[in-house]
Image (cartoon, rainbow, N blue to C red):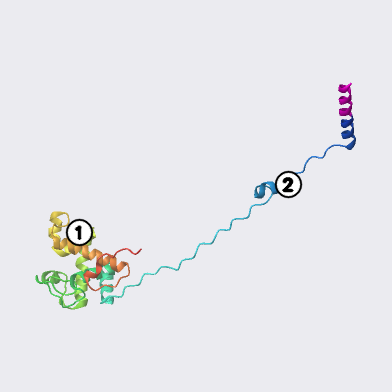
Amino acid sequence: MVRLACLAAMAAAMATTAAAGPVSAQTVNWRDAGGDMFGRPAEPIVEAEPAVLDPAWIAPLSQPFQDAIAAAAARHGLDPKLLHALVVTESAYRPDARSPVGAGGLTQLMPGTAVELGVRDRFDPVENLRGGADYLARQIRRFGDLRLALAAYNAGPARVARLGRMPDIAETQAYVATVVDCYLALTAGQGITRSTQCRPRRARR
């Protein structure tokens, strides 16, 4: 009897549920549940425009005897800065400079070399510069190497030709290095009048 009563109660409960209609499914708001992962469009990434740099500018040459050196260099196809570098190293722009071995003028021409080059007055700046530019251009054409040409200008072309390299002479090696350093300094826009100003500078941080 008890078992039958339980079954009858269960049947009555089921009937009551069916009469009430279907149970509605629970509604889930997935946007609230998942945050930005669901439904919300991604915000566009805006890249900052790169800053526009001011144009770089290297100061033009402003050296002693600038016009005369430019004219002499142009006459023989030389870079004016190279001829300036040679003059700085040879005489520090002193047209009356004389060496212990007899070289004279801005480019320190020896008497015999000056005669070969048609220079009448080694201490006339224009004549001396023309002769020095001519002599340097001849060495560059002969050896096809700037360092060998400068070594020949200092130690003599015959010696460089005989060795086929730069002579093991401390003075000549230092001379070549100084002219090159002065040329680089002038190329970087530095104003120089003495070879001691041509030493490489420490890099800026």
Disc nearest the viewer among 1 and 2: 2
In this view, the residue in front, 82 or 135, is 82
Instruction: Identify which residue is drawn at 26% across, 73% down.
Output: 69
Q: Amino acid at mark 2?
A: Asn
* 3 in the magenta segment: yes
**Residue holding disc 1:** 148
**Residue holding disc 2:** 29
For residue 193, above or below residue 168: below
Q: Find the magenta span and give its range.
A: 1-11
The answer to whether residue 3 of the structure is visible from this angle is yes
Instruction: Identify which residue is drawn at 19% across, 71% down.
Output: 131
Q: Amino acid at mark 1?
A: Leu
Instruction: Identify which residue is drawn at 26% across, 70% down.
Output: 73
In this view, the residue in front, 87 or 8, is 8
At which x and y percent is residue 132? 20, 70
For residue 121, above or below residue 11: below
> Could you tell me which secondary element the residue under label 2 belongs to?
loop
At which x and y percent is residue 137? 22, 65
Q: Residues within 10 Å of mark 2 (few under 14, many from 20)?
A: few
At which x and y percent is residue 19? 90, 35
Quadrant in the picture for residue 197: bottom left
Quadrant in the picture for residue 165: bottom left
Quadrant in the picture for residue 2: top right
Q: Main secondary structure of the magenta part?
A: helix
> Real-space Cα distance between discs 1 and 2?
85 Å
* 106 in the magenta segment: no
Give the quarter of the figure containing the C terminus: bottom left
In this view, the residue in front, 139 or 117, is 139
> Could you tell me which secondary element the residue under label 1 belongs to?
helix
